[in-house]
Image: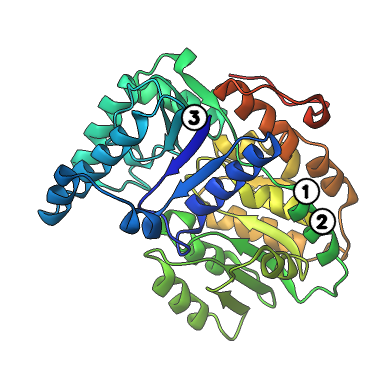
């Protein structure tokens, strides 16, 4: 068996999708299953049929991607895992992955009518769909009408190497009161966070791109006399990421819409106090959140952050232990992935608890 991850939209600048693929490839490596990733650069170089080349020539990218996935699926020993919604999702060698259903949410919608139509049709046609949380699974049933037996939860997780980096990062003196790791998209509410930040606080924002970066910088400049804000747009390695997390006291996540929430696990692994929006995906990770605040409630967020400022410095050993022994470790999620793909499980890699398989 060979697994092909196909995402021609992904490149090193799109960190969420590439990190997800890298993590799943790591799990497959633990299970001894070969895999390859076809991302933007790889897709530009791979052989293409005459029809695919014609589609690209006339600007029909979605059709070209559909044809490439169809060709890959023809190999009986190949399973294609892709988040490209316009694809032959009904093929037995195809697994559709869905991180979230932003297309149905007015606070974070994207893609227009075609994307809305495509999600409604191709998810119902799919034989197997992988989602990252129970919340997305519920949304898939409610909004797309997909039977529950076709939807499988394989969440994001945190590897042993990243847990080790987080542990090493704790040996620092705090330079920041709050850290926020997320792309600068409008629904992530960076500007809200800066407006809510109490006077005298020090904030570290880590992320890339998105349409709200300029707004975030404007708000940081407006409050420059009250708060200190450092923005890091080029954090490329886990070592850099956890070095910055280890320099903070509290991790925040004020987003109003998410599919999962991997920064909550990263904050926990670094022993940080955590403040997060009270939204369904984060409720699934409530054991790693110290305080929930209503989404889009600037006053409640300000109150939570202000009260945290009076807490003494210190690492939460309990948070670290919860992440290291959770159902979001690499071994636990490898079990879920193996069952989905009918891969024999080695007793050596079998965890104590892998959570329910949906």
Residue 314 visible in rendering: yes
**Which label is found at residue 227?**
none
| Frontmost residue, 272 versus 86 | 86
Q: Secondary structure at mark 1?
A: helix
Q: Is residue 170 above or below residue 140?
A: below
Residue 277 visible in rendering: no
Colour scheme in the image? rainbow
Q: Which residue is mark 2?
A: 164
Which quadrant of the figure contains the C terminus?
Answer: top right
List x then y, in percent, for residue 114. 19, 39
Q: Which residue is mark 1?
A: 160
Residue shown at the point (63%, 35%) measured from the top left: 283
Q: CA distance from mark 2 to mark 3?
A: 28 Å
| Frontmost residue, 229 versus 149 | 149
Mark earlier in primary sequence (3, 1): 3
List x then y, in percent, for residue 161. 76, 54
Mark earlier in primary sequence (2, 3): 3
């Amino acid at each position: 068996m060979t697994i092909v991850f196909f995402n021609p939209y992904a490149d090193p600048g799109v960190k969420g999708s590439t990190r997800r693929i890298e993590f799943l490839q790591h799990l497959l490596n633990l299970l001894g299953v070969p895999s390859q990733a076809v991302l933007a650069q790889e897709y530009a170089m791979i052989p293409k049929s005459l029809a695919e080349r014609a589609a690209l020539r006339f600007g029909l990218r979605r059709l070209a991607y559909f044809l490439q996935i169809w060709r890959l699926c023809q190999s009986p020993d190949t399973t294609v895992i892709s988040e490209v919604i316009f694809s032959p999702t009904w093929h037995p060698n195809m697994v559709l992955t869905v991180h979230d259903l932003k297309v149905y949410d007015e606070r974070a919608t994207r893609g227009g009518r075609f994307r809305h139509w495509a999600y409604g049709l191709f998810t119902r046609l799919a034989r197997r769909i992988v989602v990252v949380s129970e919340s997305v699974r519920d949304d898939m049933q409610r909004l797309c009408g997909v039977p529950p037996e076709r939807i499988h939860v394989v969440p994001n997780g945190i590897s042993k190497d990243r847990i080790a980096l987080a542990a090493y990062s704790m040996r620092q003196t705090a330079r920041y009161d709050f850290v926020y790791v997320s792309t600068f998209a409008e629904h992530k509410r960076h500007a809200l966070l800066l407006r809510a930040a109490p006077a005298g606080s020090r904030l570290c924002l880590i992320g890339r791109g998105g349409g709200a970066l300029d707004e975030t910088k404007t708000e940081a400049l407006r409050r420059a006399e009250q708060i200190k804000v450092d923005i890091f747009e080029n954090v490329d390695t886990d070592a850099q990421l956890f070095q910055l997390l280890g320099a903070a006291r509290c991790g925040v996540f004020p987003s109003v819409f998410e599919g999962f929430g991997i920064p909550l696990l990263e904050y926990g692994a670094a022993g940080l106090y955590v403040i997060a929006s009270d939204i369904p995906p984060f409720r699934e990770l409530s054991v790693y959140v110290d305080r929930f605040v209503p989404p889009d409630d600037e006053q409640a967020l300000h109150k939570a952050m202000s009260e945290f400022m009076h807490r003494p410095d210190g690492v939460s050993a309990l948070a670290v232990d919860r992440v290291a022994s959770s159902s979001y470790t690499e071994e636990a999620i490898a079990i879920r992935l193996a069952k989905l793909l009918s891969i024999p499980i080695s007793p050596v890699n079998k965890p104590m608890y892998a959570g329910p398989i949906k």
